[in-house]
Amino acid sequence: MSRIGQNYSRVKQNNKLLILQTLLRNNMMSRQQIANKTKLTPATITNIVGELIEEGLLIEIGDLPDQKPRAGRKSVAVDFNPNTIYVIGLHIRTDRIELAIVNLKGQVIADNTVKFPENTDIQGFLDLVSKLIKEIIDQNPTINIMAIGIGSVGLINYKDGIILNIHHLGWENLDISTFISEKFKLPVYVDNNARAMTLAERMYGNNKKLENFLFVFIGHGIGAGLVINDDVFRGGVTGAGELGHMSLVPNGEPCWCGNKGCLERYASESFILKELKLSSINEFIQLINNKDPNAFHLLETVGKRISIVLTSFINMFHVDKIIVGGNLVQKNNELIQELEKINQYSFLARKEEVQIEVSILGEYIGVVGAASLALYNHVFQ
Ligand SMILES: [Zn+2]
């Protein structure tokens, strides 16, 4: 191909990605609306949208609601085809492994959850993960999987797809992407689970049009991810956004990360379970729902501690919104009310309030997050 030909095809590829990204951000749109947003010519849009429909990525879904036909031409909306691109999202948590088949619209088609096996070694774990992936593929024989995304607890090198460290297991340098990729002959993308969830918020959440936000996941630990200028902020190869390891108590309790007094030692699900000697977070939520005063007091304390650290964060990066995920906030609103106090603590937020809300991705946020890694890398860049 001549250089002019190469340049032309690169421009076309860039325009395709621009159209896909625009649709991802805005949901269904007419060709005219896409032209207005992207500033590409209507002829270019018609041409490329036609190709994307032929490739099966987009479909026409009828007239746009509230849209009057102009000059006799109907305003037909296009949207992602939910039935052509499927990926697997695998979420490795401290206590369980979750996986799902997810389509291009971020919808879960099939899912499975198993307990994290006790006393397993790395090979046993990899064999179990392979078995789970094979099972979900075999159970859905008409679905063609294009890629696999893995969101994991621990310290991750997202560029090379290596789990550098899962502290509670003592595992180091686990090259999970090479193992899974060779086994299933599919591209595999790996990142920290909270960062993967942040990407899912940007692709499929309620606030995907926001250019700056913080996502916080409160689980066994506390994870987070930051979207700045419309992109997940990465920093180095191990990512950025370790809210749970920001210092709360000088010379406090030692943390697995090597520091002392980290927030997650004082405000995570594991902290709550230890304090009240409970075995599951659902028991704690039940106590909250029954207005148990001890549980309420502890939730207030946890909320205050997270707010203190979030206030420092807001004073540093005055994002528009903080989106929170995890069981503690999915099932009751008490903690969110505590976190809203950052608008009193931060002088920046007192002037321009930071909204705090619960993720709409609900219980599937982990698997949709992992799947988003695969979808984003496979389709949108
Ligand atoms: Zn720490």
Image (cartoon, rainbow, N blue to C red):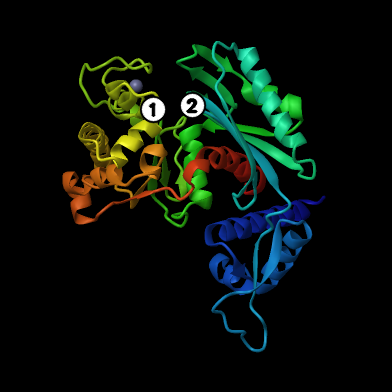
**Figure quarter occupied by ligand 1:** top left
Residue at the spot 24% in from the left edge and 36% down from the top edge = 292
Badge 1: how crowded within 10 Å, few (<14), some, or many (20+)? many
| Count of numbered tags | 2
Q: What amino acid does circle 1 point to?
A: Gly
Name the spot of residue 188 as percent of width and height, x first: 66, 32
Name the spot of residue 357 as percent of width and height, x first: 35, 50
Tag 2 and tag 1, C-beta contact below 8 Å: yes
Q: Which mark is residue 221?
A: 1
Rendered view: 270 above or below 32:
above
Q: Which mark is residue 151?
A: none
Can residue 242 be seen in the rendering of this structure?
no
Q: Could you say which is closer to the camera, residue 270 or residue 87?
A: 270
Q: What amino acid does circle 2 point to?
A: Val
Residue under pointer 2: 153
Can residue 218 be seen in the rendering of this structure?
yes
Q: CA distance from mark 2 to mark 1?
A: 9 Å
